[in-house]
Amino acid sequence: MDAAAVGGAFLSAFLQVLLDRLASPHLVNFIYGNKVDANLIQRLKNTLYAVEAVLNDAEQKQIKDSAVNNWLDDLKDALYIADDILDHISTKAATTHKNKEVSTTASSYLSRFFNFEERDMVRKLEDIVTRLESILKHKDIIGLQHIATHHHSSWRTPSTSLDHGSNIFGRNKDIEDILNLLLHDGDDVDSDKISVIPIVGMGGVGKTTLAQSVYNHDTIKQKFNVQAWVCVSDDFDVLKITKTIAEEVRSACNTNNLNILQQDLKDKLTGKKFLIVLDDVWNEDYDSWNSLIKPLRCGAKGSKILVTTRIRKVVSMVQTFQGFYSLEQLSNDDCWSVFANHACLSPEESAQNMDLGKIGREIVRKCKGLPLAAQSLGGLLRQKRDIRDWNNILNSNIWEIDEKESKIIPALRISYHYLPPYLKRCFVYCSLFPKDYEFDADDLILLWMAEDLLQPPNNGKTLEEVGYEYFNDLASRSFFQRFGSGNRSLRFVMHDLVHDLATLIGAEFYFRTEELGKETKIDNKTRHLSFNNISDPMTDNFEIFYRAKHLRTFLRITFRRTPFNNKKAACIILSNLKCLRVLSFKIFWDLNALPDSIGELIHLRYLDLSHTTIKTLPESLCNLHNLQTLKLYYCDQLTKLPNGMQKLVNLRYLDIRYTLKLEDMPREMSKLNHLQHLSCFVVDKHKEKGIKELGTLSNLHGSLSISKLENVSNNIEASQAKIMDKKYLEELSFEWSDNAKDQFTNSQSEMDILDKLQPAKNLKKVSICGYRGTRFPEWVGDPSYRNLTKLSLSDCDNCCILPPLGQLQNLKELRISRMSMLETIGSEYGDSLSGILFPTLGYLRFDGMPCWEVWHHPHDSNAYFPVLKSLVIRGCPLLRGYLPSHLPALETIQIEDCDKLAFSLPRALAIRKLVIRENNKVVLRELPLSLEEIEIHGREATESFFEVIAITLPISLKIVWIENCSSAISFPGDCLPASLKSLSILNCKNLDFPKQNQQHESLQSLSIWSSCDSLTTLPLETFPNLSSLRIHNCENLECVSAPKLTSLLVEKCVNLKSLPCHANTLLPKLEYLSIWECPEMETFCEGSMPPSLRRLVIYKCEKLMRSPSLSLMDMLTNLTIGCCDGVESFPNKGFALLPPFLTSLTLSSMSSLHTLECTELLHLTSLQHLAILTCSKLENMAGERLPATLTKLQIIGCPLLEERCRMKHPQIWPKISHIQSIVFHFKWI
């Protein structure tokens, strides 16, 4: 195959980017117009072409030849620099061309500009051409030559049909499923038609092993007259494969003539039922496949071809029935069995040598369900019993293991080898993600686009569409896997070992770290950097950014707030990293301004400021000619966008969701004709910022929210937005402001405006909020919207009638909320040709409908809601009557604050969840046996629930929440339902907690809030699996015990004096303990606390702070103390010594505290983190400096202390100056 299509070198695609730049008309005209030596450009082209000729050879040899590997690294570094120079010149050329169009004085200015800046660019270009020519000369020294195609030696010996005997783990169901597919003859009467069954999965998941197992199964041998096994691998040679099949079926024909071979094979197979396995197929060429199977079509009905492959495109090519068999990873337990079998570690030996067993299971976790990895690592440790050997494997990166000893990386590398060059670059880029990181296609494609990893589109495609093709191709080859269940999941992850492969190939050019600090080792060749957090103030990291001055990617990947030294950080980054294409300041919460120097990053394509407190954006941002993506998601302090946004002519993606203070849009947004995604448009009364600016933006994709529609004066203006022409939009939201409800007089005008905003027919989701008309236009509910799946109508206060929504044949989710004039629902269902209304609706919600009184239902109960799964009615106080009587698919029903609704459960066998809140007329007469979760509030509903379960108990009930019942009630039989896993009881003081005389194995979580006043002791031995217990305001409770409890919260138990005696045996697995407002509690317990306890929270328990038992808790690592109102200094001599091995200490809400006694903390020799929160009077630190081990001091809500720290007060500063990170409200000082 063509190397450019399959298996081409990684750098080939990069070279093409450079060659495309050199061919750019703007660049050519600019260079020749400024009298740059034409020979220089030709020398660069010649060098690139010469390099390209040997890349395939170099990529193959680099694996084993370090000299070649170093040569490639040097080449890649030079190409990066060349690309930066060419991109700089291209950008200047494009902006110069644009400036000439708008300015008559540009020529003299540009002439001066060229003399200074461009002369330097030419010098750099000359230097890099010379360097590339020097690199090229070395190719002969290291023996590189031109090879047309990049042949790859197989990572394994060819497979055979011999199986592994009985040593196959975790595949019983897979074997059974494949056998069923093979043994089933099907209903196809065409006996000439064979069935092809593809098995697809990532490399090393066990496809071949599975195929071998079924191939040798007794039932298969009995079923098929003829069997053949062919290891196809990477060379799909029709002649060779046909010859192998012929040999397998004992054909006597020995020739290289394909025609004679196929004729003989056809004669041999005619009328026979055969099974042929084609193992490890990579070919995607349909013509080759069709040629191969011609002689195989003659078999008897029921003949099968079993194909194993890593590639979904192969599946699409070969499959003859709807579907395929996707082989997933093994469970950890099954993977352990594979590992232990190959490590010769018997269960008895594992039990005896617990350290080996523990390390072994950690090694298996690294395998992430890949049996090849478990087999390979187990084989490495076969008969080795030195714990150091096992730890070496555990702590090694997979790629550090010798490939002669482990087949993991070679097995995965072959998948990488078969990627086209452009996909190789996209795949390696994903090494910037952390392991187990969930990503979606949209975000990743924007990054690929910014890094010039996508080939220029053709045939009318967009760059984004090219990106989706790349993404789907990588997913089809198992480089990406869907996160979660089902094929509809939009999130993806990379298998850890695939991530290891990307990291290995990315080498020093890609750098991923959890924390970016002054100790971070970044190479001067590093171009792409991603990190989670910044561990040091940015001023301490200056050297990092100087070393990494060629960085293209500064990407933050996290969901946690991080301090950001607001004054200097952005300036340091922008002043040093001039080559950036991707810049993310995401979730730097205290970043409230960008310096003007942002406009100097002329290479920048992607800027993410989401979740920052930025208030304004500098006008210089509009100088970023190349900017494609601007993310301002959740910038809730941002009020304006730069006025010159129309200059961002390459902008394709603008995300301003939840930027709620944004007052309007910049003028002339219509000039951004490359815009593909605009999340929101804020309509202004000013003409240049009005809704007509949307008119020319016909390429918008995804979702669009149009707000402040009260500023649209008439239907003519609305029509200028040309919403109907935006055929690529899938979601559309129309919003009027809350304060505009009373500012209109003409209902007909309102309806005309919304009518002219009618969207295209392929829309999937529509939301209308704050609409001021009395009726909706005809397009709302029009059955021609066949793709519409979600509809929301809210805050339409003047509407008194709903549109005919029942006619929307594919509507799956409907929300109607806060329609304050709506009194009746039902007559607007509309007519349906099929006779069924809402035929696909699965979710229906009514919320906040103060005047809704009547819900009419059609006479025929089968004529509507046939698949409704969830029904929610909240805040409808006047609603009377009954719910629909027949909802056969209903699983969840939630009724809240509907006092006049006489509620009874509809006829539904599938109900799993029931929620009833504040409904006085609700009486439960029966509960479905399928019920799994119930939440009930109020006396009537609770009483009826207990009456019902006394007669018939749902056998699947797992979660029960009972609240606000004053009646004296108890569980039937003084026992909890056997299936119950979680029980919450709130404000039910007269409810008797069951004595539970027999073991209850299921209960895992128990909460008792201001309830069960008769409860004095809570012996929980009968709940052996209880792991979480929360007790709040149980006035008479005196004692608690539970053997498997890991989390215990005790609140407002005013008579509780201590935890149970010998807590270490009664609560042996306790890890987290929280005690709030138990004023009489003087000691934790008699005897020691559980050794598993790590975290302790104490609030408003001053007596407990004096308990000597606190000092003895050597196991504690995290301690929080709060609300000790009378305490003026802490720790003071009246308190017990704090536990000695704390790593984290938090002091919170101590209203009288004015002095922190530092000397009393010196014994905490492991303390790393000290947080002081909401201590408004605290201003002093007494004694010696804080412990030397402290690395972070966090102070929030302590204004007096904060002021003195900022001033570096001589009484305070010497005690804290040694601490690496001092943070006030997420800001470093």
Image: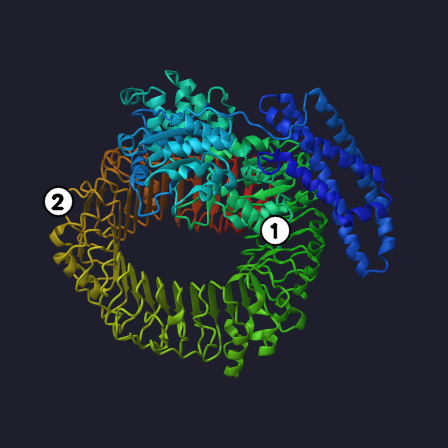
**Residue 673 in sight in this render:** yes
Q: On the picture, is 1002 further left or further right than 370?
A: left
Where does the C terminus fall, quadrant-wise? top right
Q: Does residue 790 lie above or below 25 as drawn?
A: below
Q: Secondary structure at mark 2?
A: loop
The answer to which of 804 and 1097 lies nearer the viewer is 804
**Residue 1187 in sight in this render:** no
Residue beneath label 1, please? Answer: 463
Q: Secondary structure at mark 1?
A: helix
The answer to which of 1009 and 792 lies nearer the viewer is 792
Q: Residue 501, how many percent across, how many down?
A: 52, 32
Q: Residue 514, how many percent across, how many down?
A: 53, 37
Where does the N terminus fall, quadrant-wise? top right
Q: Which mark is residue 997?
A: 2
Q: On the picture, is 984 further left or further right than 500?
A: left
Q: On the picture, is 1226 further left or further right than 607?
A: left
Q: Residue 211, how many percent across, how many down?
A: 36, 32
Q: Does residue 314 lie above or below 767 as drawn?
A: above
Q: Does residue 1122 lie above or below 279 as drawn?
A: below
Give the amino acid at mark 1: Leu
Give the amino acid at mark 2: Asn
Q: CA distance from mark 1 to mark 2?
A: 68 Å
User: How many C-alpha atoms fall within 10 Å of the one at disc 1: few (<14), some, or many (≥20)?
Assistant: some
Q: Earlier in the sequence, mark 1 or mark 2?
A: 1
